[in-house]
Image (cartoon, rainbow, N blue to C red):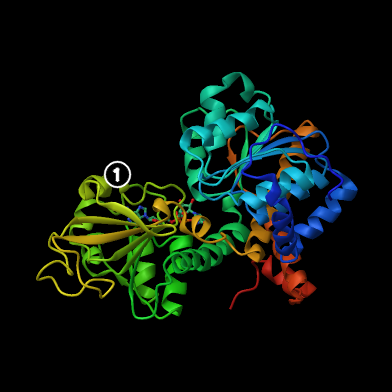
Amino acid sequence: MGNDVPARTGSDVLDTGLAPLGNQRIAWADSHMPVLSSIKERFAKERPLEGAKIAACLHVTTETANLLRTLVAGGADVVACASNPLSTQDDVAASLVEDEGIPVFAVRGEDAASYYSHIDACLDFHPNITMDDGCDLVTRLHQTRADQVAEVVAGTEETTTGVIRLRAMEAAGALGYPIVAVNDAYTKHLFDNRYGTGQSSLDGIMRATNVLLAGRKVVVAGYGYCGKGVATRARGMGSQVIVCEVDPLRALEAVMDGYRVEPMMDAAREGDIFITVTGDREVISREHFLVMKDGALLANSGHFDVEINLAELDRMAGGRRREVRPSVEEFVIDAGEGPGSPGGGSGATGSPAVVGGKRILVIAQGRLVNLSAAEGHPAAVMDMSFANQALAVEWVYGQSRAGTPLDVRVHGVPAEIDSQVAKLKLEALGTEIDVLTEAQEEYLHSWETGT
Ligand SMILES: NC(=O)c1ccc[n+]([C@@H]2O[C@H](COP(=O)([O-])OP(=O)(O)OC[C@H]3O[C@@H](n4cnc5c(N)ncnc54)[C@H](O)[C@@H]3O)[C@@H](O)[C@H]2O)c1
């Protein structure tokens, strides 16, 4: 699409004057998204989404812009809002409105009321497909507009936390239409959660603080797909990594991968930098703050801002809270018993302790650090996640149009889609692979031949 597309009214973005910058950055991401580009080309010819009205509640980034352009190329009518108040790239939002004619309701830093009013604006559009990242759009629809649920034929969900919420809705009998858990595609969670979150979370921490990772003790809470990525990358940067887990299998895996595994209560005393990626609440809380070193640095890369108990930290600081760099807030709490407090050894920063207190530094208000303090995942990673999104929408919408809609539950992504995305990515990378011979194919499907 180009500048000839008229801007739609009714959008809410920071400044449409930012569109040229957004347009340039969207084009840069596009050049790193060959799989999505090839799907866009096919969609433009086949128009499989003709008649689809898609409300997309996603991080408004350059990569998302390319997904939305792909859906439009496929014939869909699309509106978008943010799936996190801090992740919107305002120049991208402006370009989507100005250059693509896609209504967008998203302003970086919006408060909770605006965040939900923007979701409501997307629902006012009466979508027949929802595309969500964290399940806020779907829950809002079910909780406040029960009459509109029947208009929706299907949806997709991008992230682990959203899938957990959707499965809870399904179990409670509250889910009103089928949803595809895009997160569960192998070509999504392996690459996005591991390689994407791994690299971009550290990128966010470094951009926000310019901290040296080599030689620092980095505590990673959660050794799931994201945690593995973060831990591997931190180790690669020379950090000593400590993993905290609640699942015995994952904890054992971390031990076998060569990490120290400790309860958070122990790790809290030692860590210089803490990164939560659990999808769980209050993983770092009062008892941990009390024993942390002076200058301990806290970041979260799990979906919601509940992993670090900021309300408690705020109470403990009693007003001694200030921004010390863009995206970095310092909380001064009573010295407690941790290192860096009087008589307690050296702090995480090596600088002298605050008299009568110690500093705890929090990046990006405990929200997704990679999206809030950096640019989110590299486009090459989102290429696969969003290829899954586009193909999943084509699949569910096609099923519905063919009169064979999916059952009302959370569905996995069909293996053929996963395999197709991997194949397209390999082609784009110029990587060839072996092909099974007929004899091998037969052998792998037989049981007669043994020792
Ligand atoms: N930052 C991003 O861009 C990004 C990308 C993908 C996913 N996510 C989010 O990251 C979170 C994790 O995703 P994932 O795919 O790694 O999930 P996952 O389920 O694979 O891993 C989460 C791990 O955290 C562990 N855990 C749960 N509670 C814990 C606790 N109190 N202490 C220690 N460990 C605990 C679980 O046992 C599990 O092993 C989710 O919220 C997901 O939505 C963020």
Give residue 62's position: percent from left, percent from top.
67, 56
Residue type beneath disc 1: Ala
**Residue farthest to the front?**
17
Q: In this view of the protein, can residue 414 be seen by the observer?
A: no
**Residue farthest to the right?**
45
Give residue 381's position: percent from left, percent from top.
63, 63
170 relative to 247 in the view: left or right: right
Q: What residue is rendered at 72% in x and 64% in y?
A: 28
Mark 1 crowdedness (10 Å alpha carbons): few <14, some 14-19, many ≥20: few
Q: In this view of the protein, can residue 382 be seen by the observer?
A: yes
**Residue farthest to the left?**
343
Give residue 31's position: percent from left, percent from top.
75, 65
Q: What residue is rendered at 52% in x and 45% in y?
A: 84
Relative to 83, is 293 above or below? below
Q: Quadrant of ligand 1?
A: bottom left
**Residue farthest to the top?**
147
The quarter of the displayed image where residue 443 is located = bottom right
Relative to 211, is 274 above or below? above
Task: Report the front residue among 58 and 113.
Answer: 113
Q: Quick one: SS at disc 1?
A: helix
The quarter of the displayed image where residue 297 is located = bottom left
Residue tagged 1 = 311
The quarter of the displayed image where residue 33 is located = bottom right
Tell me the quadrant of the picture where the C terminus can be found.
bottom right
Task: Report the front residue among 125 and 51.
Answer: 125
Give residue 11's position: percent from left, percent from top.
68, 36
Q: What residue is rendered at 77% in x and 50% in y?
A: 70
357 relative to 177 in the view: left or right: left
Q: How many marks?
A: 1
